[in-house]
Amino acid sequence: MLYTIPADTPYLRAEPELVTTWAERMGPPPRPGMGLRVGLVWAGNPGFKADQIRSPRLKAFLPLLDVPGVTVFGLQKGAGRQDLETCGPLPPSFTDLGAEIADFADTAAIMENLDLVISSCTAPAHLAGALGRPVWTVLPFAPDWRWLDQGMCTPWYPTMRLFRQDRRGDWAPVVGRVRAALQALARSRPDPIALGFRA
């Protein structure tokens, strides 16, 4: 059976020194039960042939930036950072860290200081899954084969939840479902493992 495939995660670890460095940069976390810290990635490498269909871009994700009780940290690198120039002004609940991230070691360390990562189908989503961090990944209508063609979970990453497009190119319903889930999560503030989705 597909979901009996063993997923031995986490199989990557962040460097402890970097985790501490980024914790200081990001400031003290909210008191227990008082809020969530969420990382956001909105675009992949534009050199990938299907990037236009898999990358919602920051504009599509704007409804996630004003959820009460949620602080959002931008983890975006590369060409997708251009969106920051066209989608402003962004709310004070959003902090851009992308310009300070040197490599995946930094990204991994930041993720260890977050409650949740929300990402398009791109490398940081896989990194979060490999680290065993809670991650919600938004998928296009016809996603990469590894995500299969249905379902909210993946055998590769037990802490990942999938949000799929119902119609090609239409991100609004997907982001609406993510926002509703994020609102519920911010209200309930459960144990971190509940942020993922285990089959």
Image (spheres, rainbow, N blue to C red):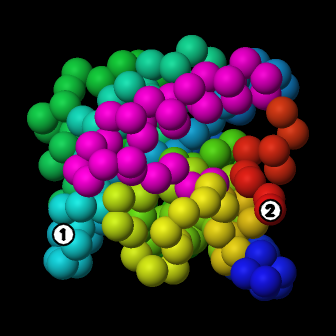
The reply, left or right, for residue 92 in relation to residue 157 is left
Q: Camera-side residue: 134 or 92?
A: 134
Q: Let me know if residue 112 appears in the view.
A: no
- Give percent across and percent down for residue 160: 65, 59
To which residue does mark 1 refer? 46
Q: Residue furthest left?
A: 86
The reply, left or right, for residue 158 in relation to residue 68 is right
Q: Quadrant of residue 199?
A: bottom right
Q: Residue, x 77% and y 76% (percent of image)?
A: 3
Quick check: marks 1 and 2 in contact, CB under 8 Å?
no
Q: Quadrant of residue 159?
A: bottom right
Q: Camera-side residue: 199 or 72?
A: 199
Q: Which residues are magenta?
A: 161-189
> Which amino acid, mark 1?
Pro
To which residue does mark 2 refer? 199
The correct choice, above or below, for 82 with respect to 7 in the image is above
The reply, left or right, for residue 10 in relation to residue 45 is right
Circle 1 packing at 10 Å, graded few (<14), some (14-19), many (20+), is few
Q: Residue furthest top?
A: 68
Helix, strand or loop at mark 1: loop
